[in-house]
Image (cartoon, rainbow, N blue to C red):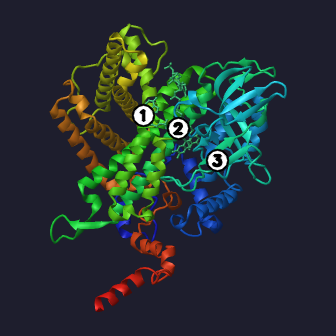
Amino acid sequence: MNSYIKPGDNPLLTEERKKCQFSTDILAAFYHENAQKIKRRHEIYQYYLENKELHDPEPTEFMDRYHRLENAERKVSLLKKHVKKAGSPLGLHYTMMIPTILNNADDEQKAEWLPKAQNLEFIGTYAQTELGHGTNLRFLETTATYDPKTQEFILNSPTTSAAKWWPGNLGKSSNRIIVVARLISNGKDYGPHSFFVPIRDPITHKSLPGVTVGDIGPKFGIPTVDNGFLLLNNVRIPRRNMFMKNAKLNPDGTYISPKHAKLAYGTMVYVRAVMIRTMSHMLGLASTISIRYSAIRKQGEIEAGKGEVKVLEYQTQQYRLLPQVARAWAFEFAGRYTRKLYAQFLGGDVDVLPALHGVSSGLKAVVTHQTAQGIEQCRMACGGHGYSEASGLPQLFATAVAGCTYEGENMVMLLQSARQLVKIASDVRKNQKPTKQNPVTDYLYKTSAATKCKIDQTTDPDPSSVIEAFEHVARRLTFAAFDKLEQLKQRGISAENAWVQCGVDLRRAATAHTRTFIARQFSNGILEMRDLPVQAVLKDLLQLYLFYEVLECDGDLLYDGYVIGQQIEYSKNNVYEALRRLRPNAVSIVDSFDFNDRELNSVLGRRDGNVYENMLEWAKSSPLNKHDVMPFHHKYLGKMMEDARQQSKL
Ligand SMILES: CC(C)(COP(=O)(O)OP(=O)(O)OC[C@H]1O[C@@H](n2cnc3c(N)ncnc32)[C@H](O)[C@@H]1OP(=O)(O)O)[C@@H](O)C(=O)NCCC(=O)NCCSC(=O)/C=C/CC(=O)O
Ligand SMILES: Cc1cc2nc3c(=O)[nH]c(=O)nc-3n(C[C@H](O)[C@H](O)[C@H](O)COP(=O)(O)OP(=O)(O)OC[C@H]3O[C@@H](n4cnc5c(N)ncnc54)[C@H](O)[C@@H]3O)c2cc1C
């Protein structure tokens, strides 16, 4: 039932796959939403295998940034002929430039810019963050001052701290970009708005007059992306280069406000909503690599004389890795909800924006943080080889952890989520009912169904008892933070300062609320699966997820006696039981993520499991190994040892 077996695979991996008790094809199609997408994935991979020009000339880990960027641009220009989506030099073009045109351009602008953007006639990015401001958008400094005489905007970076800083692909790749600048017209400052700004000549690619642009230098990771800086010195653009779907500016400079003050922030909400799936995939990649490797890595005897065992046999190894698989599934289901909500917003339902902002803010923070933690856990569970770039895990971590910062720094995002919780707590305290149904927050208007949790020792625990427990904790933390805010204000502290003094409590409430949301989406998501063997695997993954999360927040559950210690013991046993049940299918479950060797980019996680011979090949291909003796050896270490020998003879 495992369709990933092939001749020549490592027999240790084949024996795992032969134990498979479900259809990997059905589970893979469920994860990627349908069998057609799996078929398309396999077609693209097969095309890649057949076209050597698309392959890297050497492992990219051995390349410096210059050659990584050149190699990426080379492959992207080739891929352009064949697939819609392309790699990192176009990352921001697809994830932010095109969505901004879709979200913020009026019909005339869309008709002019969208076909060219989709046809890659230009490359764009989203330049909002400045050297001096990333979170606090209200204080962005770049200005766009309207000149009614020429019907142009004059874009300017008034200070060094106004330099745009960080935008992906800004440094060297992009030539037409979105600049977020303060709209100033008839002497009035209307705050940040988006503008379509050419920064490089479309033919020569040279930076245009008044534009200073470049790469910001090496980063913690993502070396192939040219994150850049940009300074604008009185650069003029036509009035119609202001995105005008929401806010508008008439030729005489009069301003027309948008239907919702935050529609301009729609691109960020879009990326936060869709990046959840990207994080699920990253955690799926890491768990695929580490579980396949753990199934071929033998280390230590459990019983003397009986031979070394696969490290996946150790319960501790299962406890480190299988929850990451469960979380990858949980995040996929949670992401489906936010993408649906975003589609509703893009379809014209502006009223859904506050709910979408609330759920996507908290979800983005929790999911990016747990994804980064999970990848690091997978890396550490692979021992020394996990620390090698051959594993693909260090660079995967460095890429994923950036998500904790970009698209809204996580702490700030959790506090945004808390704003929504506090407003609801205030309504509840005033006995006000919800103005409209919101499945994400309705539980806050209810009191705990029971004063005691129903978690007990059974072989088939009921997810609702755990979700009710999570709701109980999120409710308690939300109202505790709200009551503390009110007490501080009653003592004469301003609302703003009270908010700051409750920041940590608010963050805890938002995290608990988001945990509840994810658990509910996972529990609801698996109900669609009708194939019984696959459903059984998903139920085991759900059980693992839910009770692993119970153990993560056991203090909050025990705090007011809602749960007793015995129930925490039951929860531990439910985790161990889920691990036991999942172990035989572990390799087949990660096979079902359907990540190919190009996506995995990992010697440890190769589908065929032939790790050691390929590890040696990988190491031998290091540029250092082109020399038996390094050309500079005798100039330094060799001379040093020779001098020491001579010295010792004296
Ligand atoms: C932190 C933010 C949200 C603060 O914005 P501000 O205007 O100061 O709003 P307030 O906190 O005062 O809240 C006012 C009001 O507005 C609501 N709101 C805020 N943002 C949104 C939104 N996006 N959609 C809908 N509603 C929103 C908020 O809930 C309040 O409503 P109330 O009813 O409670 O009053 C803001 O400064 C912000 O978003 N900062 C983060 C900046 C950010 O995310 N930057 C990302 C840049 S792009 C990037 O990083 C790209 C990465 C590359 C890649 O993705 O690959
Ligand atoms: C890899 C990467 C790619 C990026 N790509 C882009 C891009 O394409 N386009 C773009 O415009 N930007 C991009 N960014 C920038 C990114 O959006 C910002 O770094 C992010 O919004 C955080 O802003 P900041 O760096 O100024 O940090 P700051 O806002 O200075 O935050 C610093 C610290 O202060 C805390 N803090 C700030 N405000 C508050 C508050 N109100 N309450 C509590 N704590 C607070 C934060 O939580 C954080 O811990 C990218 C960043 C990275 C790392």
Give the distance between the C-alpha atoms of the residues marked 2 and 3, in whole angstroms. Answer: 16 Å
- Foreground pick, 480 / 54: 480
Q: Assess disc 1: are there few (<14), some (14-19) or many (≥20) residues with their C-alpha within 10 Å of its C-alpha.
A: some
The answer to which of 491 and 241 lies nearer the viewer is 491
Quarter holding the C terminus? bottom left
**Disc nearer the start of the sequence (2/3):** 3
Q: Is mark 1 within 8 Å of ligand 2?
A: yes
- Compared across the picture, whether 96 is left or right of 596 comes to right
197 versus 610 height, above or below: above
The numbered disc on residue 411 is: 1
SS type, badge 3: loop
**SS class of the residue under badge 1?**
helix
Tell me which amino acid carries mark 1.
Met
Above or below 398: residue 368: above
Q: Is mark 2 within 8 Å of ligand 1?
A: yes
> On the image, which quarter does residue 217 sit in?
bottom right
Residue sitting at x 69%, y 57%: 77
Say left or right for 465 vs 354. left
Q: Which mark is residue 407?
A: 2
Name which residue type carries label 3: Leu
Q: Measuring 53% from the left and 55% from the top, which residue is drawn there?
A: 218
User: What secondary structure is found at the residue carrying circle 2?
Assistant: loop
Task: Report how far apart the C-alphas of labels 3 and 1 lie in the structure.
Answer: 26 Å
Q: Along the polypeptide, which appears first: circle 3 or circle 1?
A: 3
**Mark 3, residue position:** 170
Q: Is mark 3 within 8 Å of ligand 2?
A: yes
